[in-house]
Amino acid sequence: LLFNNIVETLTRVFPVLSSIYGEEQWKVVSRQFFASHASQSPYFRDIPKEFLTWLDNTYEAGNDDPPFLHELAHYEWVEAALITAEDPALPATLDIDGDLLEEIPLVSPLAWPLGYHYPVHQISPEFQPSSPPQEATWLVVYRDRNDRVGFMATNQITARLLELLNSDTPMTGQDALITLAEEIGHADRQTLIEFGQGLLEELRQRDILLGTLPHDPNVTPIHPITGE
């Protein structure tokens, strides 16, 4: 009974991966996890994370395992993790309609920028790449205000922009775009800022950015989530 419950939980959280293995082989992999992994949590909601830890640290993949096993498992786990994540406490000064260039955009703690070698969001029983493409896959997986989980296919530049906005020293959207232009050697800074403003608006519409915080150049900013 316990094993069947675990298989059911894993199948629900890893639907694409389990369908690629097929019912019988998926039970074989699940039984290896059940028999060999000492879970650090007694709660069923933590089983998918324990399974991911087991895959990364213990499981020895064979020739019959897909080469994208670890990346696909991580991608599917992210969705489950975001569904069960607690709502963050937001600053009282948050302005959902604030100026994204002149003020400090707030990245949602429930928006996770991710990079993979394989196009994990496209993998299915019908599409199983045998080797990674030349271009890496960049995604932002997020939970919006209506508790719906979605993903946005992006690129390395967008991932870096979100990293800058979520750094320990918060910066305005314009400062982040100027920093990005300097890093990538973009000659036309104003064109990048204009393009970046549209990107910031799209990120806000998806609740990847929750709004803005006031910017005072005379005050050293405190990180709105960590408080540091």
Image (cartoon, helix red, strand yellow):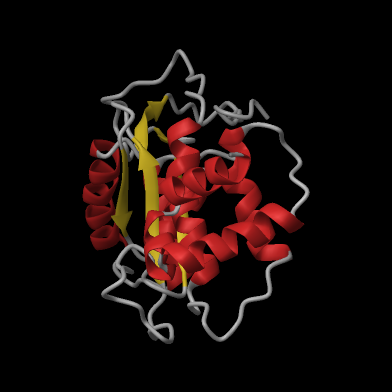
In-image side of 199 versus 223 (left or right): left
Q: Residue at x 49, y 26 (%)?
A: 216
Location of residue 203 (image quadrant): top left
Residue situated furthest top in the rendering: 92
In-image side of 97 versus 39 (left or right): left
- The number of numbered badges drawn on the structure is 0
Q: Residue at x 50, y 40 (%)?
A: 81
Image coords of residue 43 (percent x, y): 64, 31
Instruction: Please tell me whether residue 146 is drawn above or below residue 151 in the rendered image.
Output: above
Instruction: Please tell me whether residue 76 is drawn above or below residue 68 in the rendered image.
Output: above
Q: Nearer the viewer, residue 88 or 160?
A: 88
Q: Residue at x 48, y 74 (%)?
A: 68
Q: Quadrant of the N terminus?
A: top right
Image coords of residue 224 (percent x, y): 55, 27
Location of residue 131 (image quadrant): bottom left
Q: Is residue 167 visible?
A: no
Q: Quadrant of the C terminus?
A: top right
Image coords of residue 128 (percent x, y): 35, 78
Image coords of residue 102 (percent x, y): 35, 36
Q: Is residue 79 visible?
A: yes
Q: Residue at x 38, y 58 (%)?
A: 139
Residue situated furthest front in the rendering: 1
Q: Nearer the viewer, residue 17 or 211?
A: 17
